[in-house]
Image (spheres, rainbow, N blue to C red):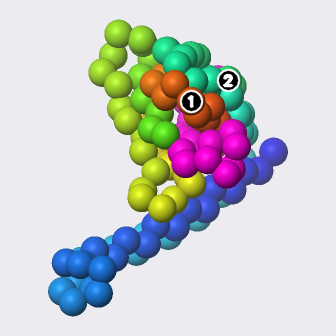
Amino acid sequence: MAIRLRYKIDAAISSNSSEEKDLGNGQFEVVIDTQKEGGSWRTKVFQSVTDLPLQMGNIGQVRYVLLRITPVDPNTTPVPIKIKLDDTANTPIEIKPMDGSKEGYFLLTAPGVLNIFATNESAAIDMYVTVYAVGD
């Protein structure tokens, strides 16, 4: 099955909210077509859960893994999710939505990750973590 990955990143950094001083702009758009496999899997990460293995296929040879975090209840403010790659003993990486956003993202472009574990330290908010994987 043919899989297409398209991602676009626009970043404009200014000195303040009136954008008085431009500190840099970056725009990246990539489209990759591959005949390899891919897919997406969503895991509900309940409040106060530690090192929950995320649902996903065999992602060990994929080229791109994108993680998306969103609150289960879209009317709540999202909380950060910490992930660990491959082993629960590894250093956690925090995925945190930008202020005012309901979603957070983490793009991994290195192959070889076999497992991803999620921790939700919130005592009140359940979160979804969706894993998107494309090609090898």
Q: Which residue is mark 1?
A: 124
The prevailing secondary structure element of the residues shown in magenta is loop
Q: Quadrant of the C terminus?
A: top right
- Going 42% across and 29% down the picture, which residue do you hit? 82
Q: Residues within 10 Å of mark 2 (few under 14, many from 20)?
A: some
Q: Which residue is mark 2?
A: 55
Task: Give the image quarter of residue 15.
Answer: bottom left
- Going 33% across and 16% down the picture, which residue do you hit? 90
Q: What separation in Å lies between label 1 and label 2 (alpha carbons)?
A: 22 Å
Asked if the stretch drawn in magenta spans residue 74, the answer is yes
Q: Nearest to the eye among marks 1 and 2: give it.
A: 1
Range of residues picked out in magenta: 58-78
Q: Seen in the image, is 125 located left or right of residue 12? A: right
Residue 9 coordinates in the image, percent (x, y) = 46, 67
- Going 18% across and 86% down the picture, which residue do you hit? 21
Label 1: which secondary element: loop
Q: Amino acid at mark 2?
A: Gln
- Going 45% across and 38% down the picture, which residue do you hit? 80
Label 2: which secondary element: loop
Q: How many marks?
A: 2
Q: Amino acid at mark 1?
A: Ala
Task: Give the image quarter of residue 87.
Answer: top left
Res. 25 visible in picture:
no
Q: Quadrant of the N terminus?
A: top right
Residue 30 coordinates in the image, percent (x, y) = 52, 65
Residue 48 coordinates in the image, percent (x, y) = 52, 19
